[in-house]
Amino acid sequence: MKRFYIIIVALATISFYGCNGEKENHSHHSEDIHNHIHENEESHNHTNESEDAHNHNLAHADEHNHSHADIHEDKDVVVFTHQQSENANLKVKKIEYTPFANVIKCSGDIISSPADAVYIVAPTSGIITFGNPYPVDGSVVNKGDKLFSVSSSNLQDGDIAYRTKIAYEKAKRDYERAEELVKDKIVSEKEFSDIKVEYENAKAAYEAVNGCEGNGSAIIAPTEGYISQIMVNNGDYVSVGQKIAMISKNKKLLLRANIEHEDFAHLPKIKSANFRIPMIDFLYKLEEMNGKVLSYGKYITHGENFIPVTFEFHNNHNLIPGTYADIYILTTTEKDVLAVPEDAICEEQGLYYLFVALDCEHFRKREVSIGESNGDMVQILKGLNSGDLVVTDGVHQLKAASRKSVIPEGHSHSH
């Protein structure tokens, strides 16, 4: 019997060094997988240090030998060599219990922020003419660019902008002449004061119409940004103060989410949100974009059965207003939850799987039950244990290998 135990210990030792023998050829990536597995084994070995060392080693050797035999018979185990792992950039993560926010999944869109927009208004009444280049929605503009002009030359009252210009020029000449005459006491201080007031009023009126050209009053961009909305057509009559266009700086945007009325009770618990845009493989996190909750509706959108929730965020990624988004609204946080990255999960015929590392070259395909997703991590309800080493990168290559074969015949674990 003693000889039998010695043989088992020897086999376990050979197997262990076989898994770690190619130290010279392993990449940093392969070492990372080995370190995860080694740390996991050490954690397991130190959980009961009061056991008799001899009995513990024998039990561990017997367990290792038994599991190694089981590996070769298990159809859910995939062999993936060190070289394959390196080529696939395969990575594993030790899964522990972690806080996880409850999620409300919904859809919505990105819109311009009113706080980040400037309206252009007509400085005078008249017929509006679009500038050259022709301004359209989405046009990029710089501060001072001429966008439109307004002319009243063909109206009954005549060209207001032109009349304002003439009045300004006359008032300016009178003021400059009075400045010289008041020095010689030819014009009294009171007369000079009246002339100065007339000049300043005429100047203010002239500047209000932004100067005058042959085709009317020029309307220039007060700030840089892009035209997000044009509210008139070329040739329309506009009244003084009427909104003509809106310029958005695009530095801040709004995320407008449409939540179903069944989730109304969760609205006060909303903390933040993540979102994805179709055709872009990236998760946007409001907490990384200085995002905040602006408001949530106290009403249901007529005919749509939705409640609007609005977030504001800094546009760090040059996003475009009007873009559709899949949104993950984060509410209160639960503790003691097992969660894995979304990329770690495979789906086949409506079932979900993970790959769990058994050792350096063997990975078990394990079915799991999933819970909520925040767009980044997915809660695992069943099928995963704390401390399991889950493959997070290289999953597709492992999945492809699992389809080819489980364990090639004649494969030896020792090297």
Image (spheres, grey):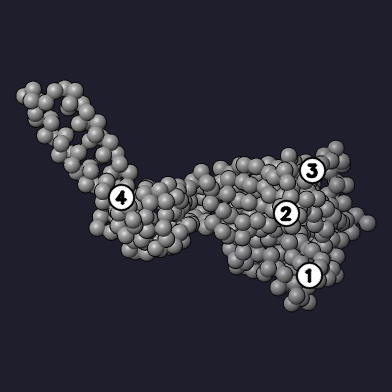
Asked which secondary structure carries label 2, the reply is loop
Q: Earlier in the sequence, mark 4 or mark 1?
A: 4
Which mark's residue is nearer the viewer, 1 or 3? 3
Asked which secondary structure carries label 3, the reply is helix
Q: CA distance from mark 2 to mark 1?
A: 40 Å
Q: Is residue 27 left or right of residue 198?
A: right
- Locate residue 65, reporting x and y percent: 84, 60
Q: CA distance from mark 3 to mark 4?
A: 58 Å
Identified by mark 4, the residue type is Ile
Q: Which label belongs to residue 348?
A: 1
- Locate residue 99, reporting x and y percent: 74, 42
Q: CA distance from mark 4 to mark 1?
A: 73 Å
Question: Which residue is denoted by mark 2 in the rendering?
Answer: 302
Q: Residues within 10 Å of mark 4 (few under 14, many from 20)?
A: many
Asked which secondary structure carries label 4, the reply is helix
Q: Earlier in the sequence, mark 3 or mark 2?
A: 3
Identified by mark 3, the residue type is Ala
Q: Residues within 10 Å of mark 1 (few under 14, many from 20)?
A: few
- Residue sitting at 51 percent across and 43 percent down? 115
Q: Earlier in the sequence, mark 1 or mark 3?
A: 3
Identified by mark 1, the residue type is Glu
Name the residue nearer the viewer: 119 or 360: 119
- Residue sitting at 19 percent across and 43 percent down? 169
Question: Which residue is denoted by mark 4 in the rendering?
Answer: 160
Q: Earlier in the sequence, mark 2 or mark 4?
A: 4
